[in-house]
């Protein structure tokens, strides 16, 4: 195998394998350079084939809806995988169990559950990611998180083996999952409970109103920039350190919710990262607390 790989090195794949593909349009922050290779697998067998055939040293990264990602300006080495419609199926099983593909947007699951009279998924209506991203980040809001509802997840491991993993084995904690980084989530089995459509819709409406009032949801943003340190709110620490509205070039800490970073138009990934790092320094100086990035920063500088 050569040092750098092209689509010709993987002739048996049936999905699209695109060279030098810009990633910015696939992310909410709309920044970053190209992926050496972007793979859109035709189906599970196709993705398993890539993982089984690829040389060990060739990195693979899975992109969901790109709502918690900062791709650096130099782009990504190796293969970036974006799951396709084949991974976005949903079905109801007995006892309010929902099986859902990892490419399904969280909001679509929330609406599907509501329409089916299954409660417990309204919180997903406010999170703009996919189920794969939710499984990796343990996404949550308003007191609920992904792990609360999860029974088991189906993954493809680093060599493309299909494995079913129980929620306990995934060792979830706040915005974190301890599954090996190489695993790709392809499906989840969630447990809900019987509920009324009207009540669930009301919950979803309330969540939407709250979001509109408190978060810059129409901007180019990556959601919460930093995790909340135990016993603290990141936005409060940032505010107290004078970070609200701070800018580097076109990168800005939102005036509406100062733990949200915004690309006001022409920010580079470097601007956004520099802004985040300067916020971390100010907060550490002001409060002695080290903020930890929640946004995943990936790729070459
Ligand atoms: C306006 C806004 C509001 C937000 N509000 C919230 C909120 O209330 N609560 C919250 O928790 N988050 C929130 N977020 C952050 C974000 O939506 C979540 O973290 C979401 O779960 C990320 O999902 P994604 O599909 O966009 O993943 P990406 O951002 O694309 O990726 C995030 C991580 O998940 C991994 N990943 C994605 N898919 C898979 C897969 N199939 N298998 C393995 N790993 C995978 C990626 O490799 C990466 O490490 C918000 C973001 C925005 C922009």
Image: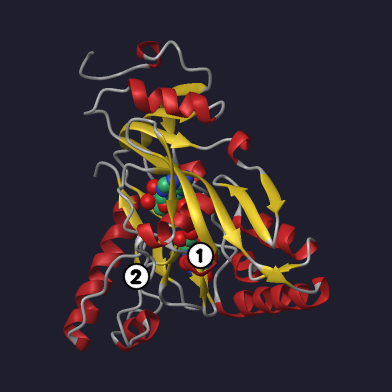
Residue positioned most to the front = 94
Q: Residue at x 22, y 14 (%)?
A: 2
**Would you call the spot at circle 2 few (<14 residues within 10 Å), some (14-19), or many (20 or more)?**
many
Q: Is residue 227 above or below residue 191?
A: below
Residue 49 point in image, percent of width and height: 42, 22
Q: Residue at x 81, y 71 (%)?
A: 197
In primary-sequence order, the first of circles 1 and 2 is: 1
Where residue 149 sits, quadrant-wise, is bottom right
Q: Is mark 1 within 8 Å of ligand 1?
A: yes
Residue 228 point in image, percent of width and height: 35, 77
Q: Is mark 2 within 8 Å of ligand 1?
A: no
Are dots 1 and 2 in contact, CB under 8 Å? no
The secondary element bearing badge 1 is classed as helix
Q: Is residue 219 above or below residue 3?
A: below
Considering depth in this image, is 78 or 248 the residue closer to the camera? 78
Q: Residue at x 22, y 79 (%)?
A: 282
- Taking 42 as reference, is 136 left or right? left
- Taking 224 as reference, is 231 left or right? left
Where residue 79 sits, quadrant-wise, is top left
Residue 209 point in image, percent of width and height: 68, 78
| Mark 2 lies on residue | 226
The circle drawn on residue 146 is 1
Quadrant the N terminus occupies = top left
How far separated are the C-alphas under marks 1 and 2?
19 Å
Q: Is residue 220 above or below residue 10?
A: below
Residue 263 visible in this rendered orientation of the protein: no
**Would you call the spot at circle 1 few (<14 residues within 10 Å), some (14-19), or many (20 or more)?**
many
Q: Is residue 240 above or below residue 148?
A: below
Quadrant the C terminus occupies = top left
Residue 157 point in image, percent of width and height: 36, 38
């Amino acid at each position: 195998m050569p040092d750098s790989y092209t689509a010709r090195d993987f002739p048996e794949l049936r999905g699209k394998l695109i060279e030098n593909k810009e990633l910015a349009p696939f992310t909410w922050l709309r920044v970053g350079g190209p992926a050496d290779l972007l793979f859109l697998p035709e189906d599970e067998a196709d993705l398993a084939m890539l993982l089984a055939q690829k040389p060990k040293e060739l990195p693979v990264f899975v992109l969901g809806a790109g709502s918690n990602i900062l791709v650096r300006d130099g782009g990504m080495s190796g293969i970036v995988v974006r799951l396709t419609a084949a991974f976005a199926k949903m079905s109801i099983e007995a006892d309010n169990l929902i099986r859902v593909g990892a490419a399904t947007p969280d909001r679509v699951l929330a609406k599907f559950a509501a329409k089916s009279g299954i409660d417990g998924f309204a919180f997903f209506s406010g999170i703009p990611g996919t189920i794969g991203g939710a499984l990796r980040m343990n996404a949550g809001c308003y007191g609920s998180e992904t792990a609360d509802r999860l029974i088991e997840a189906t993954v493809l491991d680093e060599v493309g083996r299909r494995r079913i993993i129980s929620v306990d084995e995934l060792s979830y904690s706040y915005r974190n999952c301890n599954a090996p980084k190489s695993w790709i989530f392809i499906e989840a089995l969630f447990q809900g409970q019987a509920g009324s459509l009207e009540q669930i819709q009301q919950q979803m409406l309330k969540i939407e109103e709250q979001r509109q009032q408190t978060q810059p949801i129409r901007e180019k943003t990556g959601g919460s920039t930093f995790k909340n340190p135990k016993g603290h709110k990141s936005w409060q620490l940032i505010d107290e350190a004078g970070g609200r509205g701070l800018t580097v070039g076109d990168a800005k800490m939102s005036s509406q919710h100062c733990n949200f970073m915004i690309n006001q138009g022409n920010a580079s990934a470097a601007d956004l990262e520099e802004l985040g790092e300067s916020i971390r320094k100010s907060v550490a100086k002001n409060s002695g607390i080290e903020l930890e990035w929640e946004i995943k920063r990936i790729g070459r500088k």
